[in-house]
Amino acid sequence: MSEASVLYDNPGPRTRRNILIGSVVFGVLAVAGLYFFVYLPLDENGQFDAEKWAPLVDPGNEDFADVWSLLGQGFQNTLIAAVLAIVASLVLGTLLAILRFRLKELAHGPRGSTAGRQTFLGLAWVLNLISRVFVEFFRGLPVLLTIFFVARILPEYGVDLSPRLFLVIGLALYNMVVIGEILRSGMANLPPGQKEAADAIGLSGLQTALTILLPQAFRIMLPALISQIVVVLKDTSLGFIISYLEALRMGQFIIQELGNPIQVYVVIAVIYIAVNYAVSRLAVYVQRRVARGRKTPPGAEVPDVTKPTPLAGAPAGEGGAAVG
């Protein structure tokens, strides 16, 4: 019996026919709606005229080189800010995950009898509470406001940076707490036997987190991490609020000169979709490689654990059993 038939009954001929008819009707209605409510209004307003698209798609147009020069600079700035923000978010998020994981362990650990032990646990509890408030504050604050406040508050204290660095700091503050919680939850949900085994061989809590739990959390939570990286890449478009010359800001300059907002935004959207799709496919490839690396290599001999193994240096009898 197939897995699908266990979950639900296979549709009969009448049900399949109804599904086909419903799909065809929905498809026709969708195409008709796009034609009457999207295509016709745009066509009546001249949005499909060649003169509006030529600066973006016709290399022979006099504005083509300037337009793509601006878009190229914008996407270059976008990618630079995205890479810096991603690296900062991953590094700071990893440190935050380890700190939160250890503080939570210490705060909820066994209570000691000495006053010094109780003071240490009380301090760990307070620090754990502070870190939790920090995470909830930046995770609940919209990333747009985070970027805006960073660019407005830091200069008041004499921190004068470029718009790119303000954007990177704002994105890193928001995404580091998300990545930190992703990794912390990955470490917390690993089987407890791994930590117990690490304790048994004398590893400290920090060594256990760094060498045993964290690498597994990265591997397990890789899809969620890649999704967050895509979010960082898309959120760089919010740099317009602090006048950072990223792709969307450059697109606004082009629109002011040529007066074709729909065409420019469509091209920018297509490029964003292509880049994000490439990142997503890269994530799938990396995930498959990691999963393949955990399997037994092709051609490798898998030991049969059902048979007894001879003792070293002892002669083997029939069936491979050790001769006493």
Image (tube, rainbow, N blue to C red):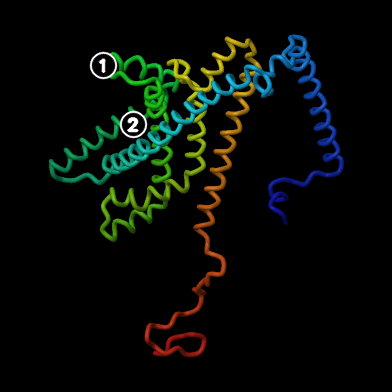
Q: Position of residue 288 (x, y in %)?
A: 55, 51
Mark-to-mark CA distance, 1 and 2: 26 Å
Which residue type carries mark 2?
Arg
Please tell me which residue lies in front, 170 or 29. Answer: 170
Going from N to C along the chain, the mark reached first, 1 or 2, is 2
In the picture, measured across the screen, residue 138 lies left or right of residue 45, that is left
Whole-percent x, y for residue 164 in the image:
40, 23
Q: From the viewer's perspective, is 219 left or right of 91? A: right
Residue at 37%, 28% (x, y): give it.
Answer: 173
Q: Secondary structure at mark 1?
A: helix
Camera-nearest residue between 230 and 163 = 163
The residue wearing badge 2 is 132
On screen, residue 80 versus residue 43, left or right, reads left
Crowdedness near tag 1: few (<14), some (14–19) or many (≥20) residues, C-alpha within 10 Å: few
Q: Residue at x 57, y 33 (%)?
A: 275
Any mark on residue 157, and which? 1
Q: Where, quadrant-wise, is the C terminus in this rendering?
A: bottom left
- The residue that appears at 67% across and 19% down in the rendered structure is 61
Give SS at disc 2.
Answer: helix
Measuring from the top left, give residue 290's x and y in whole percent.
50, 52
In the image, residue 180 lies at what x, y percent?
39, 37
Contact between labelled residues 2 and 1, with CB atoms less than 8 Å apart: no
Against 281, residue 292 (above or below) is: below
Mark 1 vs mark 2: in front: 1
Q: Which quarter shows the N terminus?
A: bottom right
